[in-house]
Image (tube, rainbow, N blue to C red):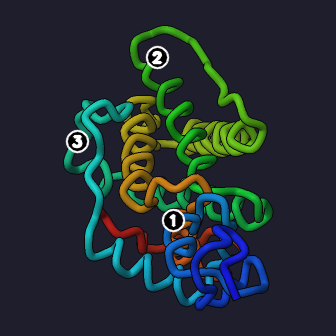
Amino acid sequence: MSCPICEKRKAARFCPAKGEKICAVCCGTEREATIDCPSDCAYLLAAHRYENEHQRSLPADTPLLDEKIPQDIIYTHQQLMAALAFSIAKFCAVQPAAVDTDLLAALQALAQTYKTLNSGIIYEKLPDAPLPRELYAALIAFINEVKKQHAERAGSASLKDSDIFHLLVFLYRMGLLRTNGRPRSRRFIEFLRGQFPQAPEFKREESRIIVP
């Protein structure tokens, strides 16, 4: 039986997304591109293991790549970074259609917003697509709530916009390194879910985020 995608090669691999066998070449080229692969697909997991062993490099023109992140920012604001990551994971749990590019678009836009705030300019450029825009709004609401709590807490140091900016850049770069660049990739999403398995609410505990 020939592959239903290319209609040329022999169908040898069962594709759970399509419910039928496809050829190995189409499995490799269309995976997470035109095929919406389930996270438990054996061939997808094998591909991800290979990608973990061969981490991709980021192009020189990657947005925000030239920003220098203070070495101690992750440790001094470990709780906040974990809370931001959890907020993203929680958003994805109720948005099964979300893919890595949605997360990256939201994080990049939000980081750019805080970059302008640091320069004294209030300028907000929302993501174009609806889903990244929803995540952007959810993260804005979360950050504003955290700021409010800091302001109301006696003796608490104010949360600087520059610190939030650097944490957002860090998460954005983490996502770029965790994803594989394919349009339907969910590698970054799966990574975040692995950090907070089945957690109904964020608990103030030591972060399990792994620094890339």
Q: Amino acid at mark 2?
A: Thr
- C-alpha gap between disc 1 and disc 2: 40 Å
Q: Which residue is mark 3?
A: 70
Image quadrant in which the C terminus is located: bottom left
State which quadrant residue 17 falls in: bottom right
Q: Which residue is mark 1?
A: 29
Q: Mark 2 or mark 1, which is nearer the start of the sequence?
A: 1
Query: What percent of the width, then of the height, locates residue 86?
Result: 59, 63
Indicate whether 98 appears above or below 201: above
Callout 2: 10 Å neighbours few (<14), some, many (20+)? some
The image's mark for residue 116 is: 2
Callout 1: 10 Å neighbours few (<14), some, many (20+)? few
Q: Mark 1 or mark 3, which is nearer the start of the sequence?
A: 1
> 115 or 8, which is in the foreground?
8
> 122 or 50, which is in the foreground?
50
Q: Amino acid at mark 1?
A: Thr
Q: Are marks 1 and 2 in contact (CB under 8 Å)?
A: no
State which quadrant residue 34 falls in: bottom right
Callout 3: 10 Å neighbours few (<14), some, many (20+)? few
Indicate whether 29 appears above or below 103: below
Under circle 2, the secondary element is helix
Q: Residue furthest front?
A: 8
